[in-house]
């Protein structure tokens, strides 16, 4: 009969709507995961930028960063990029080991 046909079709429509919602949720979850991963991998550079921007000075008034030492123009540029890349690579390796990458 027509009523049973319509009921069956409505049931199929409901299942299709549920499937679309599940796919949308999976897509949003993956996007959130990707954004979180990118932000976490870029965090070392943000941290180093904050530390370098604090303008620490030694007794002579020269720029210095605690533990890292003097900030000369030649040295500070390479220290920033090497430390940032090194910490980021360590995080990436840790994420890969943990199965997050």
Image (spheres, helix red, strand yellow):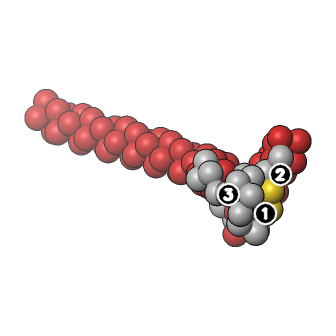
Residue 42, placed above or below residue 95: above
Q: Within the image, what quadrant is residue 89 found in?
A: bottom right
How far across and how far down the image is residue 81, in percent? 80, 46
Along the polypeptide, which appears first: circle 2 or circle 3? 3
Q: Nearer the viewer, mark 2 or mark 3?
A: 3
How far across and how far down the image is residue 66, in percent? 71, 66
Q: Residues within 10 Å of mark 2 (few under 14, many from 20)?
A: some
Residue 17, placed above or below residue 65: above
How far across and how far down the image is residue 62, in percent? 74, 52
Residue behind mark 1: 68
Along the polypeptide, which appears first: circle 3 or circle 1? 3
Residue behind mark 3: 57
Q: Nearer the viewer, mark 3 or mark 1?
A: 3
Element under disc 1? loop
Please report the residue visible at 17 percent of the width from the left and 39 percent of the height from the top: 7
Residue behind mark 2: 79
- Disc 3 from disc 1: Cα separation: 12 Å
Q: Nearer the viewer, residue 81 or 15?
A: 81
| Extreme residue in the front direction | 60
Q: Nearer the viewer, residue 15 or 21?
A: 21
The count of marks equals 3
Q: Nearer the viewer, mark 1 or mark 2?
A: 1
Element under disc 3? loop
Please report the residue visible at 40 percent of the width from the left and 40 percent of the height from the top: 24
- Disc 2 from disc 3: Cα separation: 17 Å
């Amino acid at each position: 009969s027509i009523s049973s046909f319509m009921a069956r079709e409505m049931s199929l429509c409901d299942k299709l709507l549920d499937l679309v919602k599940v796919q949308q949720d999976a897509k949003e979850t993956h996007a959130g995961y990707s954004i979180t991963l990118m932000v976490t991998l870029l965090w070392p550079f943000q941290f180093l930028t904050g530390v370098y921007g604090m303008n620490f000075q030694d007794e002579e008034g020269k720029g210095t960063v605690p533990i890292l030492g003097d900030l000369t123009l030649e040295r500070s540029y390479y220290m920033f990029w090497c430390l940032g890349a090194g910490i980021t690579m360590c995080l990436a390796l840790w994420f890969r080991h943990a199965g997050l990458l």
